Image (cartoon, grey):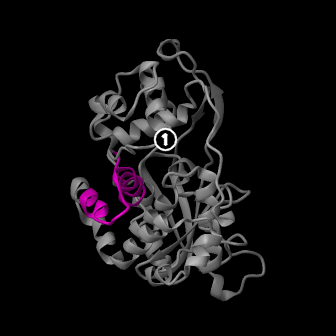
Amino acid sequence: MALPAPGAGPAAMPLTRDWRAPFPLDVRLILSVHRRGPRDPACRVSGDGAVWRTSLTPDGPGTLRVTALSAPLSASAPLSASAVASASAVASVSAVAPVTVVSAAAWGPGASWLLDTLPSLLGAADDPAGFAPAHPLLSDLSRRHGGLRVGRSGRVLEALIPAVLEQKVVSLEAHRAWRRLLLTFGDPAPGPAPAGMRVFPPAQVWLRIPSWEWHLAGVEAVRARTIAAAARVAGRMEEAMAMPSAEADRRLQAVPGIGPWTSAEIRQRACGDADAVSVGDYHLPAVVGWALAGRVTDDAGMLDLLAPYAGHRHRVTRLVELSGMRPPRHGPRLAPRDYRAF
C-alpha cells in the first residue's frame, strides 16, 4: 500500500490497488511517453522510482502514483552479432527483467477512475501477439524490451495540447511552454504529489488564456489557435477514444491545425494505437531508415520499411528509438527559438 507523504492529513489518504498483469511490463518505460521533459508538472519520477501522474479525469482531478513491486533489473548487454551486422553502429541496450505486479495509489475526485483504468494505461488493451519481427535488430530489441507495451491514457485533450505545442519546434521550446502553461493555469495536484505538480486545466480554461500569456509561454498565434479550436470541441475530441483508428484520425484532423503527425502522436498516447506512425516527424524517418536499412530515408521510405509490420508500426518505431541508433550528423542542430523576444 502506498502511504501518504509524512505529515499529510486524513484528506491525503489514497485509494490503492495492486494489479498483477498477465504479461511482463516495464512501468517506467510504458509511462515515459507521457512525460514532457524532465520538469513536466504533470508527470514525474520520484527518487524511489515511482511514477507520478496527474490527470483531469471524467470525475475530476486526480493524482496517480505507480510503483513496481519488484524493480526491473538492468544490465548492459550488446546486441547479437546478426543485429550488429544489420547496421553500421548499434548502441548498447539495457536488458530488463519484466515486472508483472504493480502497486498504485490515487488521490482526488478522479482517484477511482485512475485506478480503474490503470491496466489500460499500462497496456492491457495492447495486443503484440501478431508482432513477429524478422529483422534481427527488431528481434533483439523486442526480446530485450519485453516489458514494452503501448498503453492508453484515455484522455484525448491531455495528449492533444502538448502534441500541438511540439509542432515544428524543438523539444526544449515545447517543454518550456507546457511547463509554464500548466504552472500558470493548472490546479495543484491532489494528495502528497511531488512539489510543483499540477493538473491539466479543463477546456474552458484553455479557451480563456489571453494572447499575452501564450506569448509569455513562447507559443505563437498559429499553435494557440489550434489549441483553442480543439478546446471548443473537446467533447468531440474525447469521442475519438471509442472510434476505430482511421475514424479517430479523421475526427482529430478535422480540427484546423491538426495534421497526420499530431493525430498520430495523440492516438499513440490517448488511444494506445500501436500502428499510428508519426509521419512528418523531423527525425523519425532518418532514424528508422538508418536502423532498418542502413540509410537515411524520407517519410515514404520509412513507410515502405514499416509496411511488413502493419498493425505494429508505432511499436517498431518505439523499439528503434530505444536502440539509440542515429545516422551521423552533418549539420548544426536546430536551435530553440524564443517567441517572447519578438
The type of residue carrying mark 1 is Tyr
Q: Is residue 60 left or right of residue 43?
A: left
Q: Position of residue 256 (x, y in %)?
A: 34, 65
Q: Is residue 81 left or right of residue 265?
A: right
Report the front residue among 195 and 302.
302
Q: Residue at x 58, y 19 (%)?
A: 89
Q: Position of residue 218 (x, y in %)?
A: 62, 65
Which quadrant of the rendered structure holds the C terminus?
A: bottom right
Magenta residues?
248-274
| Residue that mark 1 sits on | 282
In which quarter of the view is residue 68 placed? bottom right
Q: Position of residue 254 (x, y in %)?
A: 27, 64
In which quarter of the view is residue 63 placed? bottom right
Q: Tell me, yes or no, whether the highlighted magenta stretch contains residue 294.
A: no
**Residue 14 appears in the picture as rendered:** no
Q: Tell me, yes or no, whether the highlighted magenta stretch contains residue 265.
A: yes
Report the front residue among 214 and 317.
214
